[in-house]
Image (cartoon, rainbow, N blue to C red):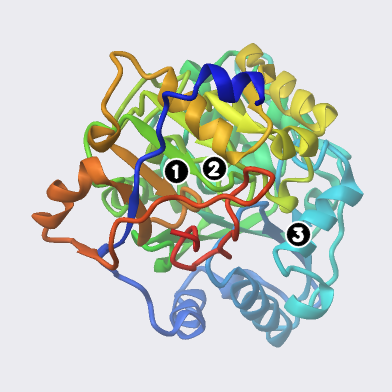
Amino acid sequence: MDIYEEMMKTAEIPRFAPIVYDLPSARIEDVPAELLRELYKPGVMDRIKPGDAIAITAGSREIDGIVPILRTIADEVRKVGGKPFIVPAMGSHGGADASRQTLLLGELGINEHSVGAPIRSSVETCRVGTTDDGLEVRVDRYAFESDGIIVVGRIKPHTSFRGEVESGLMKMMAIGLGKPYGAALCHQLGFPAMGENIRKFGTLILKNAPILFGVALIDDSKHRISKIEAIPKEDIPEREPVLLRIAKKRMPAIPFRPIDLLIIDEMGKEYSGTGMDMNITGRSSQLGDTGPAPKRIAVLDLTDHSRGNAAGVNEADVITRRFEEKIDRASLYVNSITVREIDGLRIPAVMENDRLAIKLCIFTILPSVKTEKIRAVWIHNTLQLERMYISEGLLREAQTHEMIRIRGPLREVRFDALGNVREYPKPGSDGPQNR
């Protein structure tokens, strides 16, 4: 018997039942049509002149319908006589490498054919100005040398800081278009100053770079586009904080407080900059515990899209061997060094398989909890909370929750001969399929 199996033989994995969490939806049914209405408001598309080369930003996150959104914008730019192209706006992601940033876009379905515009990727930057305290601000060379920039970005709470602006258009300009330089610049004073730095640098970019307007996107609680707003450049500083407040109200949450164990099938850069959204897990080395703040977190895999960048893995307690083997330390270290976060370089305990990873979490929960009393939640990733699995210890609470439907009986977790869950679900499925 494996030494770890022997040591943790008293740790029993609870039975799990599938549930559906009926999150409220505010989804826009016809996203391209709504986008067109926004684009043709006064002060938006009328800023593009025939022959203008127009840069359109694309980030590294998975955004519902991002391909048709970018394609619609590119099509409309062409209709008014402009020449659109796509610029990867993702700071130091992709190992701070231009070709890898193009590959990251491709894995999100963003390529010249799908959006109808060429991809121009570079990590070279041009100076746009200097702040009052002497910090030089720079942006992507292709974007800066264009005739106009359309900033496309999702507005949502950040995982590591709070401010009037967090993840959104200003961050897309300051860090996304700033490339590795901009990412390092914004992080050099630490996360407590991040919100103010992003606002300060973004304001300078709005003043001195050829920004035309922004296209702000807001998710509903089901990770579907619920709001689109085209914002003239001069209105972005005042409008974005308002939209952030709306985004925070639409942010979903795990519907149990507290929980002993959170199991996550996979984390990845397409889901969050930290792989798993700390606004969902409730655990953040920067923000502290905000709920449900699990006593233990097990993450079983890393997405291929992350290309080895396991930023945020330090927030887990245990990972599997296959997860560890996917980690590209160079990418992880570049990310952590850029944000000046030493904790980000740390890797959790590694167990050989899923079963041992889960058992280690259970065995080390103190005070110890009887198997049938363990409050455990199992999700696929932190973007998809509509379908999840809950342990026996949460079943009674779930039965009285008006937004939860129990979809099947409690079943034991089954593992294959290697100790791994026998079948992994695809994103959007009902979760682990072998209960």
Quarter that holds the C terminus: bottom left
Q: Which of the marked residues, 1 or 3, is nearer the chain's N terminus?
A: 3
* Tag 1 residue: 237
Q: Amino acid at mark 1?
A: Pro
Helix, strand or loop under label 3: helix
* Tag 3 residue: 105
Q: Position of residue 413 (x, y in %)?
A: 45, 50
Helix, strand or loop under label 1: helix
Q: CA distance from mark 1 to mark 3?
A: 27 Å
Q: Amino acid at mark 2?
A: Met
- The answer to whether residue 408 is visible is yes
The mark found on residue 174 in the picture is: none
Q: Which of the marked residues, 3 or 2, is nearer the chain's N terminus?
A: 3
Residue at point 34%, 59% (across, down): 221
Residue at point 56%, 55% (across, down): 153
C-beta proximity under 8 Å, tags 3 and 2? no
C-beta proximity under 8 Å, tags 2 and 1? yes
> Which residue is more in the foreground, 110 or 58?
110
* Tag 2 residue: 170
> Which residue is more in the foreground, 228 or 347?
347
Of discs 3 and 2, which sits in the foreground? Answer: 3
Q: Position of residue 409 (x, y in %)?
A: 28, 62
Residue at point 68%, 34% (across, down): 310
Quarter that holds the N terminus: top right
Q: CA distance from mark 2 to mark 1?
A: 8 Å
Mark 1: few/some/many CA within 10 Å (<14, 14-19, 20+): some
Of discs 1 and 3, which sits in the foreground? Answer: 3
Left or right: where does residue 29 sit relative to residue 129? left
Left or right: where does residue 276 sit relative to residue 240? right
Mark 3: few/some/many CA within 10 Å (<14, 14-19, 20+): many
